[in-house]
Image (cartoon, rainbow, N blue to C red):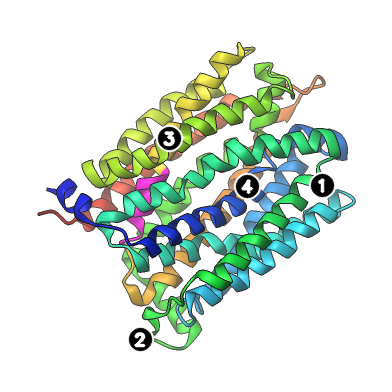
Amino acid sequence: MGIMLSMKYQFTRYQVFIVGMLAFLQFTIILDFMILSPMGAVLMKTLGVSPSQFGLVVSAYAFSAGTSGLLAAGFADKFDRKKLLLFFYTGFVIGTLLCGMAPNYEMLLMARMFTGLFGGVMGSIVFAITTDLFPLEARGRVMGFIQTAFAGSQILGIPAGLYLANNWGWHMPFVLIAVVAAIVGVFIFYFMKPINAHLQIKNDRKPFQHLWNTISNPKHLRAFATVALLSTGGFMLMPFGSAFSVHNIGISLLDLPKVYLITGLFSIITGPLVGRASDYFGKFQVFAFGTMLSIIMVLIYTNLGVTPLYLAVLVNVVMFVGISSRMIPSQALMSAVPEPVNRGAFMSISSSVQQISGGLASVLAGVIVSEGVDGHIEHFPLLGIAVVMASCFTLIMMYTIHRQIPEKVD
């Protein structure tokens, strides 16, 4: 049985170290992206921008990330993955620092575009490295641990970011992220071994030919379409989460960090458990459970009015359990779609599709919702319906991928 096989796999000390380092790297990348959402209420007020303009700041990162992912895809399997990781991570650090130095809305928009060019590719490189180093039957556990970066950003990063923004201005969180990321980059440079086994496999060496062969593969196309739908939900709800919490649910700016802190604490516990469950029960089965739970909680969340703090926290916690139960198994399952020779290109294109579709979703969300005179976010339940519809279609498409990738069993 699947559980017996997956639990037989023993991680080496170096593999444990690599997983921890990649999780910390993901923490900085995710925090840089996610920090905009809780600071939405502060930024819209400080910079005097509308919800649609703020949605553009969020989507600018996604669009530039999607573009760079496509451009990098043809070269993704041509270099040592460690060197590729360091190149793009350096650009990410510079871009984040530029965000921390932006004097106005226009400069912030351009800085987010620059950051997206580099940061948006990082996730695909991380997952390519993970897939190179770990077999499918153990990837649920690995993905579950790496995805604790999301929870870590909520526990440590977002509350700290909100505290810094409230006391020293919205620039300070970006400066702090750049400093931490630079330290992580130094550790990667000195301690990560080269990851170049894929270079020994004969493949099409022309970048554009390699890109086309990866894109035109029917199996890959189905996976890319699934990724596009999968990313829609988070990108539609996330940009206006803090503004909705403050103006619709009635949570004060001082209490908002508590919501992210408590939700993150639960997520950091449930993430590894979801990873283990994916290896135990099957990745699609856990994904289906997460989809059903997410649908229920999204409908509840997007229709909340003024709500007691404890109940708002409970809704957020359960909703994020559902989101984790979709994210972790889907990433583990997707990692088995490409052959090793196309793995880097596939991950890069997949990241681009995710970012571009997410950017479109953010723009659409900014068009659907509007801000009332008192700051109240209007039409938020419509976003919930859109997310539910996308989730249903994603479940069907993920099932077709699951049927093509039977998990190894004894």
Label 2 residue SS: helix
- What amino acid is labelled 4 in the image? Leu
Q: Which residue is mark 2?
A: 200
Write down the region rendered in magenta: 327-336
Residue identifier under label 4: 31
Q: CA distance from mark 4 to mark 2?
A: 35 Å
Circle 1 sits on which residue?
171
Circle 1/circle 2 CB separation < 8 Å: no
| Residue drawn 35% across the image and 30% down it | 292
Which quadrant of the view contains residue 335? bottom left
Of circles 3 and 1, the one toward us is 3
* Mark 1 burial class by Cα count in 10 Å: few <14, some 14-19, many 20+: some
3D distance between C-alphas at marks 1 and 4: 14 Å
Q: Residue at x 64, y 58 (%)?
A: 63
Towards the viewer: 261 or 187: 187
Q: Are marks 4 and 2 in contact (CB under 8 Å)?
A: no
Instruction: Identify the amino acid type marked 1.
Output: His
Work out whether mark 1 precedes mark 2 in sequence or the reverse, and give the earlier one: 1
